[in-house]
Amino acid sequence: MSSIIDIKFELESNKLDSIKADATIVIVKNKDLSHKWVTQEDELKVQGFEGSAEELCQIGNNIYVGVPCFDSDEIRLALCNALKKIKKSSYKTISIGSYSSKRELNISAIVEGAILGSYKFDKYFTKKSSINVEKIIISTEDYSDNKIDETKANEEIKFSFAVANATNMAKTIVNSTPNDVTPQRLAQLAKELTIDVPNTNCFIGDNEYLESENMNLFLAVNRASCHPAKLVHLSYTPKNPKKVITLVGKGLTYDSGGLNIKTGSYMSTMKADKGGACAVLGIFKAITELKLDVELHAVIGATENMVGGDAYKADDVIIARNKDSVEIQNTDAEGRLVLADCLSWAQDKIKSDYILDFATLTGACVVGLGEYTTGIMGNNSKLKHQIGANNSGELSSMLPFNKYLKKTLKSPVADICNISSSRYGGAITAGLFLDNFITDEYKDKWVHLDIAGPAFVERDWGYNQTGASGAGVRLVSYWINKLIKD
Ligand code: BES
Ligand code: ZN
Ligand code: ZN
């Protein structure tokens, strides 16, 4: 896929000023122009550069970028902005120092800022953009004279290179249009992640398979689409895995709303309703490339939600794979139906230590948390906090379940209704609908991530471009890496 940013990163144990490169990026912390790396203080002052947050100035071959502090996300943004500035130049090699803080080594942030920030979705343009930078050399000389652990720094380069490129791959699939990435194409893209990759396997189930598994909720959502549904299962089974993790992704390659059709502007951007599936694919790509000691399963429910003479309807009652009857009251609440059957399948087929699902599930999550933040739900507080609390740069927040909201899913004609009787708390009630399909064995092993906000944002934000951000890939790759290395 064209989304790979081909920049090499090298750690060098020489002082910054003795590294040979075409240009140097200097990050200026909180207006401190007296630092030894700021060699052109007078010229910078003439240019009006003070070194405050997001300020940028180029003097000769030095690019100065201001940050308020050395938090990892500030470093990511600084790299993104510096590379934007020199993208069109002929510079091939760039040098930069180390910027550790008390909490972080921040080598990861340099790599991620460069790779994520340089991404451009140009798949459908006849003219493709390119970046001339071939190599970024990171000096182990540190801004604050901290000692840089070289082994750790090299590990961070490797990890972040894989994770950032996997995030960009997820962006490209999410950004791809519904006439390009159909369920079949999504399944094919998934399969490609296992070709010539050791210890991996790919299974693709079609409608007949879904019927044999009684996945009637999934099939109902698919019925009015001319594209058949696909259940994708990728597995990575290394020799001595420390944990078994299953990721389940909502793969709606288009969500028209079905008969409860979306109106006007609510329908466009619904190509991004496959964001959950793409997050799962991104994490799978990163973890298999890094050959981490974890058994990983990626399960995707891929379909469109369309209208037609045989479309499923509000008032239908459908028997789920787990045998619960489900009353349909809104065909636009389709993601939870696909996920309910996929979660049931994943719990029966795979013996996992953890099961995480990713979905652009509710507009309510975007209303509640804003478009930049993922909603984390589940029954295990410790696990939710572990997943949310990392320095991946992704924003997330907990949305708590409660028994009163659970009751709002009661149906007068079936075991459960696919929408809540309350107009409030829609992200949580969607999460609680999924919880209904989690067995007792898995209650504390399951976490639901509603990425409806950050999966696709219609404006630039920080080092993210307009459109897809690959939400979920970094958040959960960081969590998995920490889980098995601690
Ligand atoms: N795919 C949407 C959720 C969504 C909305 C994602 C906005 C990204 C941005 C989902 O299938 C949906 O339509 N949900 C409904 C649920 C409602 C009918 C209970 C919603 O959020 O309005
Ligand atoms: Zn919908
Ligand atoms: Zn949807």
Image: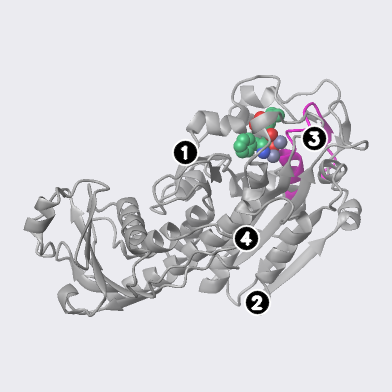
Compared to residue 91, the image places residue 244 above or below, namely: above
Compared to residue 51, the image places residue 412 above or below, namely: above
C-alpha distance separating marks 4 and 2:
16 Å
Instruction: Identify the residue position indicated by label 3 in the image.
Output: 258
Identify the mark at residue 397; answer none if there is no mark.
1
User: What's the amino acid at mark 2?
Assistant: Asn
User: What's the amino acid at mark 1?
Assistant: Ser
Say which element carries label 3. loop
Labels 1 & 2 near each other (Cβ < 8 A): no
Q: Residue at x 23, y 73 (%)?
A: 140
Residue at the extreme front of the image, as rendered: 126
User: What's the amino acid at mark 4?
Assistant: Leu
Q: Residues within 10 Å of mark 2 (few under 14, many from 20)?
A: some
Marks 1 and 4: which is nearer the front?
4
Say which element carries label 1. strand
Identify the mark at residue 90; answer none if there is no mark.
none
Instruction: Identify the residue position indicated by label 4 in the image.
Output: 281
User: What's the amino acid at mark 3?
Assistant: Gly
Residue 404 at x, y percent in the picture = 62, 22
Q: Earlier in the sequence, mark 4 or mark 2?
A: 2
Residue 411 at x, y percent in the picture = 79, 23
Q: Earlier in the sequence, mark 1 or mark 4?
A: 4
C-alpha distance separating marks 4 and 3:
26 Å
